[in-house]
């Protein structure tokens, strides 16, 4: 692995994903093999059992809703039984089941349960393959973005997905920070910037102080369950409600195919309304009306006003989160120099207006809301792969998105590292025993915003044993939290008197056990080895053809000379030229079969030439 | 240059020899910074002069993190230097946080001030205090608003002092002045009323004392004059009216005695002593029947009034006889 190996940045989105890189000092999006910058984050198993990813998967979603997984990002790293998962189960057309440990979510795809990380890994693998096709060589290292408000479990699961896809994940970075990196790239900025990122499934807002190529994140905030999908759902609910009213209570929600068509139509109408004041929704033969009656059609016009009315509270929620984050940052809205809009949802005029009203300034129009996050990830990837090269001198100072702490007596949550602390960081807190002669203490490491421990995410637990027996409150236990630059949380507990110490590196559970992860990675490695194998074969074939071409070319003068003295094989040189031309063409392509055929033809020509060149002059 | 920078610092050869991808000058820089952390102030950590402005703090921080953030060496072998870098970075961040904080900076500036600065600051603080006192005084003299406020404060203070010293009239005066200077003052009005009441009581008591002294020496003329003076101050003083009625009778002026008693009854119609005084006065002017009625009324209100009973008995007998 050298510094010259290409590195990529991936924006793994809820609805679409984008891959980018920095080439010749310029960040650029890598188009997928269909030439598109955006790849739908959709994974499916077709009716014939074939796995599909991206637009191919999206295209067949209507007819194969049960086996088409979209918005996996909303489920990644979530616990089975959590409110978010329960909500998702009600609205998603595909089936969810609990993992073997009962704590994570599996998606039923093609009849068998698949972890969410594997679903995301398929999207990542697709993007990796796109990048490899573009570079014409292997790509193994990447920076992947996640919403700033993702907790450790969600980040870890995303990292696992990268590993499964065969990528070394250099860093998981926050989407808004990434957008700011792309926004500030190549400019000498000294600015306070807010990134307002309303994507397909998540809402993020970050306040950054940019100066001297250092991107210092002051505060982040967000809602991991607020995004374009929620806007779509409001339209769908409105459509189903009106449809039921007009058609004597026909409930479209019972019909998965109808639901999928509604979803597509809602999304389309929403996007249209960003440009036009009205959108027509026309879905013929949407539902059966009962025996003998004609099928029911849906025809409805949605105005921009109506859409704004349906989604008013969603926009208000965004502004409320923004306000809270600015407060956390200790910055007034008037002190912000620039507001960057990221995510497809920020195209909605109502959203733009709300942002403008809140900040009292026109948001920045200079960035491409869909691509900017991936571009920033590519810049960070470059900075981490080759930190010394000019142009990649950016430095990201990111913060912890949520409070980190431990559970204390009474089931309460004691924060040790508060949110918005710049990493790397460490903090120490002293605790005491709560029972007489207590010799061990269980330390549960948690992340979240609630005072109640059980409402927060459990990152890991360990036991500090060998405490000197004493009356309660007499033993001091020092707990130290340590977060490294790459976001790894280490926790250690020490009995101050005895020096007894215990520590763990908190690797949040992505739901997959380490064994499971290893098995999945092995399986994928096999796939990749196969692919690599074929690449190696291809190289060998090319080598053979190239040397044969050279040999044939070398023999041409001798053969021509020999032919001058012979009656036979006067067209041999012409034929040979034809074979050579075909060989040169094949060398440029990647078709192994063609190379094999050319190789054979060359071999025959060579034999012929050798014979001719060596043949004694024709006596007569 | 670097030799000078690290003068007096001993580098552990093992640290310098560790197999990491950092050149020697960078190693020395990291080792020196890490070793100095416990003794350095936040200013020194950032390479700044004491009390450098927040903008300089921010700029120095950015310069320093470019050297000490581990990401600057991503992909390189760092060994023990990784945690050293992180330790320096954390301290840099802490220094930046404190020195740019609206609340924490000022106390830190004071706490880390060099001795000379402390004296200078203290002197300046005292000078500032003196000046502001002077300024306040000047303002009070020249500014009518401030002058009025000062006057009110003084009057209130004086009023309370007078009240304590028993100079109620003076106190009432002061409070009354405040109330007229500052109609919004809710304190002055009631205080003035209370002081006035106290002043009246004091003067009445004074007259009574004088009258009693005269009575004791049989000087009924003087006593009556004193009672009259007291009634001028407080015309509705029941006890003084009854005493005056008695004094007038002693001087043989039954009609005056009757007037005083009538007055007393107006003040307190259910006063047995007043009825008795009226009865005695009426008897002296020969209105025996009216006198009897008045005395009966007195006994009715207060059956234990023996002097009235006695007189009533006599009246009845003489009436019969």
Image: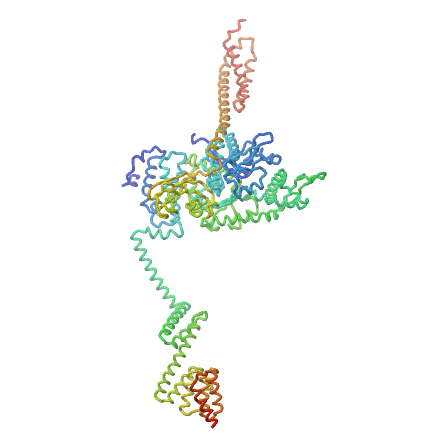
Whether residue A577 appears in this view of the structure is yes
As drawn, which residue projects farthest toward the left?
B8
Q: Percent position (x, y) of residue A465?
A: 37, 40
Q: How is the image coloured?
A: rainbow
- The foreground one among A32 and B84 is B84
Q: Nearer the viewer, residue A304 or B163?
A: B163
Viewer-nearest residue: A311 or A574: A311
- Residue B321, horizontal then vertical, whole percent: 47, 95
Q: Quadrant of the N terminus of chain A?
A: top left
Residue A47's spot in the image, x, y percent?
60, 31
B140 over A342 or under it: above or below: below
Is residue A431 visible to us here? Answer: no
Q: Residue furthest right?
A: A292
As drawn, the residue found furthest toward the bottom would be B321
User: The C terminus of chain A appears in which quarter of the rendering?
Assistant: top right
Measuring from the top left, give residue A469's x and y in whole percent.
Answer: 35, 44
State left or right for residue A61 relative to residue A465: right
- Residue in the image at 54% along x and 23% along y: A591
How many labels were placed on the picture? 0
């Amino acid at each position: 692995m050298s510094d010259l190996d290409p590195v990529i940045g991936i924006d793994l989105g809820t609805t679409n994903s984008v891959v980018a890189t920095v080439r010749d000092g310029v960040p650029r999006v890598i188009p997928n093999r269909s030439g598109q910058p955006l790849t739908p984050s959709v994974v499916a198993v077709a009716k014939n059992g074939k796995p599909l990813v991206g637009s191919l998967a999206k295209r067949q979603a209507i007819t194969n809703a049960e086996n088409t997984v979209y918005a996996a990002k909303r489920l990644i790293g979530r616990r089975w039984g959590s409110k978010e998962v329960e909500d998702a189960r009600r609205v998603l057309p595909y089936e969810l089941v609990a993992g073997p440990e009962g704590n994570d979510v599996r998606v039923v795809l093609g009849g068998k349960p698949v972890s969410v990380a594997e679903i995301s890994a398929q999207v990542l693998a697709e993007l990796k393959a796109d990048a490899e096709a573009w570079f014409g060589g292997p790509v193994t290292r990447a920076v992947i973005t996640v919403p700033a408000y993702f907790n450790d479990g969600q980040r870890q699961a995303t990292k696992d997905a990268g590993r499964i896809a065969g990528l070394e994940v250099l860093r998981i970075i926050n989407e808004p920070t990434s957008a700011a990196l792309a926004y500030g790239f190549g400019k000498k900025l000294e600015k306070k910037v807010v990134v307002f990122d309303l994507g397909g499934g998540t809402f993020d807002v970050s306040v950054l102080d940019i100066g001297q190529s250092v991107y210092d994140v002051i505060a982040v905030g967000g809602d991991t369950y607020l995004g374009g999908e929620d806007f779509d759902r409001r339209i769908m609910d409105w459509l189903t409600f009106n449809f039921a009213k007009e058609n004597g209570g026909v409930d479209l929600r019972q019909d998965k195919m109808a639901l999928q068509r509604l979803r597509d139509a809602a999304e389309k109408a929403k996007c249209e309304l960003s440009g036009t004041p009205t959108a027509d929704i026309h879905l013929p033969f949407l539902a059966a009306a009962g025996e003998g009656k004609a099928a029911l059609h849906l025809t409805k016009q949605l105005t921009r006003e109506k859409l704004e009315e349906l989604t008013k509270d969603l926009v208000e929620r965004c502004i409320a989160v923004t306000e809270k984050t600015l407060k956390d940052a200790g910055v007034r809205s008037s002190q912000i120099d620039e507001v960057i809009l990221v995510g497809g949802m920020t195209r909605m005029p109502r959203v733009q207006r709300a942002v403008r009203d809140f900040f009292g300034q026109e948001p920045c129009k200079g960035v491409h809301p869909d691509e900017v996050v991936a571009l920033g990830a590519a810049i960070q990837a470059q900075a981490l792969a080759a930190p010394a090269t000019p142009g990649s001198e950016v430095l990201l100072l990111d913060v912890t998105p949520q409070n980190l702490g431990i559970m204390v007596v009474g089931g309460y949550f004691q924060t040790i590292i508060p949110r918005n602390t710049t990493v790397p960081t460490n903090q120490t807190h002293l605790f005491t025993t709560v029972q007489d002669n207590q010799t061990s203490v269980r330390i549960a490491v948690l992340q979240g915003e609630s005072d109640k421990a059980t409402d927060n995410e459990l990152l890991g637990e360990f036991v500090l044993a060998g405490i000197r027996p004493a009356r309660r409150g007499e033993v001091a236990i020092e707990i130290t939290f340590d977060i490294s630059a790459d976001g790894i949380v280490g926790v250690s507990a020490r009995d101050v008197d005895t020096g007894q110490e215990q520590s763990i590196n908190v690797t949040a559970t992505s739901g997959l056990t380490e064994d499971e992860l290893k098995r999945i990675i092995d399986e994928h490695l096999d796939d990749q080895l196969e692919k690599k194998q074929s690449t190696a074969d291809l190289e060998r074939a090319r080598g053979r053809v190239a040397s044969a071409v050279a040999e044939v070319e070398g023999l041409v003068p001798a053969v021509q000379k020999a032919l001058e003295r012979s009656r036979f094989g006067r067209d041999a040189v012409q034929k040979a030229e034809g074979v050579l031309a075909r060989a040169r063409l094949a060398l440029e392509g990647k078709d192994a079969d063609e190379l094999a055929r050319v190789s054979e033809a060359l071999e025959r020509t060579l034999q012929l030439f050798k014979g001719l060149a060596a043949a004694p002059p024709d006596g007569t | 240059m670097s030799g000078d920078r690290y003068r007096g610092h001993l580098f552990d050869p093992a640290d310098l020899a560790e197999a990491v991808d950092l050149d020697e000058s960078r190693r020395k820089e990291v080792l020196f910074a890490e070793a100095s952390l416990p003794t350095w102030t936040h200013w020194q950590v950032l390479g700044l002069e004491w009390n450098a402005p927040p903008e300089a703090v921010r700029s120095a921080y950015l310069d320093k993190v470019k050297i000490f953030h581990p990401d600057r060496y991503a992909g390189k072998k760092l060994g023990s230097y990784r945690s050293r870098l992180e330790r320096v970075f954390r301290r840099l961040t802490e220094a930046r946080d404190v020195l740019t904080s609206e609340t924490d900076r000022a106390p830190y500036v004071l706490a880390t001030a060099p001795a000379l600065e402390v004296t200078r600051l203290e002197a300046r603080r005292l000078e500032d205090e003196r000046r502001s006192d002077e300024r306040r005084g000047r303002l009070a003299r020249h500014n009518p608003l401030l002058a009025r406020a000062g006057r009110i404060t003084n009057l209130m203070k004086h009023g309370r002092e007078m009240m304590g010293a028993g100079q109620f009239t003076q106190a009432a005066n002061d409070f009354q002045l405040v109330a007229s200077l500052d109609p919004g003052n809710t304190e002055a009005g009631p205080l003035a009323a209370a002081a006035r009441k106290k002043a009246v009581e004091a003067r009445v008591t004074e007259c009574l004392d004088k009258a009693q002294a005269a009575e004791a020496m049989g000087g009924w003329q003087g006593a009556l004059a004193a009672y009259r003076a007291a009634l001028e101050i407080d015309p509705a003083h029941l006890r003084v009216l009854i005493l005056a009625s008695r004094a007038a009778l002693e001087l043989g002026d039954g009609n005056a005695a009757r007037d005083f008693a009538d007055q007393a009854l107006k003040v307190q119609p259910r006063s047995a002593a007043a009825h008795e005084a009226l009865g005695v006065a009426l008897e002296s002017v020969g209105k025996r029947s009216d006198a009897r009625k008045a005395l009966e009324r007195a006994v009715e209100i207060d059956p234990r009034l023996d002097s009235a009973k006695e007189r009533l008995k006599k009246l009845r007998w003489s009436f019969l006889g």
